[in-house]
Amino acid sequence: MSNAVSGLPVGRGLLYLIVAGAAWGTAGAAASLVYRTSDMGPVALSFWRCAVGLVLLLGARLLSRRTRTAARQPLGRRVLRAAATGIGLAVFQTAYFAAVSATGLAVATVVTLGAGPVLIALGARLTMGERLGRGGLAAVAGALAGLVVLVLGGGRTTVDPWGVLLALLSAAGYSAMTLLTRWWGRDGGTDSSGTTVGAFAVTSLVLLPFAAVEGLVPHTEAPGVLLCLLAYVASVPTALAYGLYFAGAAVVRSATVSVIMLLEPVSAAVLAVALLGERLTAATLAGTLLMLGSVAGLAVGEARDARAARGSEPEAAPA
């Protein structure tokens, strides 16, 4: 199940994406605890999340002894890739937080994560010729249906047009980030570690002025707890999760990536029931099963296609 271009096995890329999606789902609960512990705002939290995550990634990169293909690439190309990915990440996060503020968490989540797979599937088809097939389309439809049931099935919601537009902008940023990562991954010269570091550096710079206006240093009566929460948010759902995401997104089909990352609300729902005492409803269970089934179906199909492609490669002629 190796990807012939970048060298990372597709099966391992799928595993990376599954872990990243599950880790992303814990960020919401950690962020809610940050808000309860201090008066930190969402933009400031995003900035510290990326800035501290950048420090952790730089440390891990310095400790790594692997040969990096990015070091042999022209500086201009590396800067362009970092800028494009970082701006996409900044738009994705900032517009999503603004959409949550304008129209609520449920609608913002459904519109952002629901529009993402559609935009990515269309973009991948137009720019890279990636086809999902009937089974893939059915899996995407099932995942989106599960997302709607999971998020909106528990109660009433209020839809604000401005909030919906912000959520669509967030989905566009996420889609651009995913498509660019996949496009660059096809040439075999992508260094996922370098991509993640560059994206976080650009995102931190973009968010810094907005975070400064909101307030960089929060007021809290429990600084130790706040520091531990920030360390967790910066390390697990940020440095680790995005590092795995960029590595997996470079070798897995873009539409499959977008559906696998829908594990984020599933992980958040499971965490809310298991640790935060929320009630397990029929909607939560049905939506979770629909999404897990769709993710499993796409992952199996991706691995099967990769195995078939590898088996069809011509063997080298004897010397």
Image (cartoon, rainbow, N blue to C red):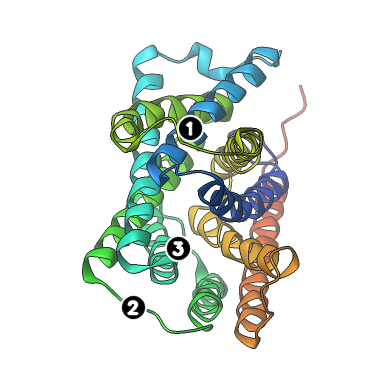
Asked whether the beta carbons under mark 2 and mark 3 sit within 8 Å of each other, the answer is no
- Amino acid residing under circle 2: Thr
Q: Amino acid at mark 1?
A: Trp
Furthest residue in direction bottom, as rendered: 282
x then y, percent, for residue 305: 65, 58
Give the Cα distance between marks 1 and 3. Answer: 23 Å
The residues bearing labels 1 and 2 have C-alpha atoms spaced at a distance of 30 Å
Residue 28's spot in the image, x, y percent? 55, 55
Q: Which of the two discs, 1 and 2, labels the residue nearer the N terminus?
A: 1
In this view, 125 is above or below 291: above
Q: Which mark is residue 113?
A: 3
Label whose residue precedes the other's in the sequence (1 or 3): 1
Q: Would you name the residue on which mark 2 appears?
A: 158
The x, y position of residue 252, in whole percent, is 58, 49
Question: Which residue bears the numbered disc 1?
Answer: 48
Q: Residue at x 54, y 49 (%)?
A: 31
Q: Viewer-proximal residue, 83 or 306?
A: 83
First of labels 2, 3 by sequence position: 3
**Image marks 1 and 2: residues in contact by CB distance under 8 Å:** no
The residue positioned 70% from the left and 14% from the top of the image is: 63
Which quadrant holds residue 125? Answer: bottom left
Q: Nearer the viewer, mark 2 or mark 3?
A: 2
Whether residue 189 can be seen here: no
Q: Secondary structure at mark 1?
A: helix
For residue 139, say whether it is visible.
Answer: yes
Provide the secondary structure element on which disc 3 rests. Answer: helix
